[in-house]
Image (spheres, helix red, strand yellow):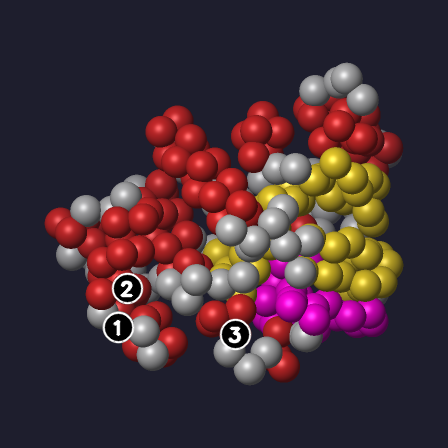
Amino acid sequence: MIELHRVTKTYNGVKALDDVSFTVHPGSVTGFLGPNGAGKSTAMRILAGLARPTSGRATVLGKPYAELARPGYDVGTLLDAGAQHPGRTGREVLTLGALMLGLPKSRVDEVLDLVGLTGKEAGRPIRGYSLGMRQRLGIGHALLGRPRALILDEPANGLDPQGIQWMRELLRGLAASGCAVLLSSHLLYEVEQVADRIVMIGAGRVLADGTLAELSQGRTLEQTFLALTSQTFRTPA
Ligand SMILES: Nc1ncnc2c1ncn2[C@@H]1O[C@H](COP(=O)(O)OP(=O)(O)OP(=O)(O)O)[C@@H](O)[C@H]1O
């Protein structure tokens, strides 16, 4: 379970998150949607222990990230696919991750296979990777410890249609095995295909939280999104 309970985050007096609560249950893919600057990354960074809430509580499997005894086994995160050192190879990144978790080297090959990176690609420095390859590597890194919760910030960016279909099946499979998946994206059609629940935020506040059917009521997710978020845009003076 991934949970935010009444989380507020203030940067220099500006509320990036304002009393935000939602829950991602085991066995579900929850799409986390909102316009640019709505607060999605801030919420995910707080859940991953990279930022502190100004008030409220953020937990994964019942505990704040910093209190998890085995974080790499409990939660996998992909917050910025570009965050790896460009001089490292994909295999080196995964091997370092596996070493940190005490996993055998064979797990690196399993994960490469899972995310569809070939041995040749894995042996190349990341600076030569396409965005889609970086995303695949980042997803693989998040999955190394077979975590029970996944926090993925825009993982579909840069994936080609086959890659998007692959990710859809991967995330559905992970949810079917009991994983709680929180997935932010601006690709509304894709979210519609993969998510069973949606949390929509705008200007730091939760605008909607429910199943796709509850939110859409016969409309597309895009129509629902535009209707709900239009009030959160500021009109230029
Ligand atoms: N470190 C920071 N310092 C100051 N303000 C910040 C910081 N991080 C985020 N913000 C502000 O918090 C608000 C929410 O930003 P955030 O990156 O969480 O939005 P987002 O929904 O992830 O946007 P996007 O879809 O563009 O990635 C924005 O107004 C942003 O400028």
How far apart, in angstroms, are the residues tagged by discs 1 and 2? Answer: 6 Å
**Circle number at residue 107:** 2
Q: How many marks?
A: 3
Q: Residue furthest left?
A: 120
Is 114 a magenta residue? no
Q: Residue at x 51, y 41 (%)?
A: 172
Few, some or many residues within 10 Å of mark 3 (<14, 14–19, 20+): some
Q: Are marks 1 and 2 in contact (CB under 8 Å)?
A: yes
Q: Position of residue 113 (x, y in %)?
A: 26, 49
Badge 3 element: helix
Q: Residue at x 56, y 60 (%)?
A: 149
Instruction: Say above or below: 57 vs 157.
Output: below
Front tag of 3 and 2: 2
**Where does the C terminus fall, quadrant-wise?**
top right
Q: Which residue is mark 1?
A: 104
Few, some or many residues within 10 Å of mark 2 (<14, 14–19, 20+): some
Is 57 a magenta residue? yes
How far apart, in angstroms, are the residues tagged by discs 3 and 2? Answer: 17 Å
Which badge, 1 or 3, comes first in the chain's sequence? 3
Q: Is residue 70 left or right of residue 60?
A: left
Q: Residue furthest top?
A: 218
Q: Are marks 3 and 2 in contact (CB under 8 Å)?
A: no
How far apart, in angstroms, are the residues tagged by discs 1 and 3? Answer: 18 Å
**Where does the N terminus fall, quadrant-wise?**
bottom right
Q: Quadrant of residue 82?
A: bottom left
Q: Which residue is mark 3?
A: 71
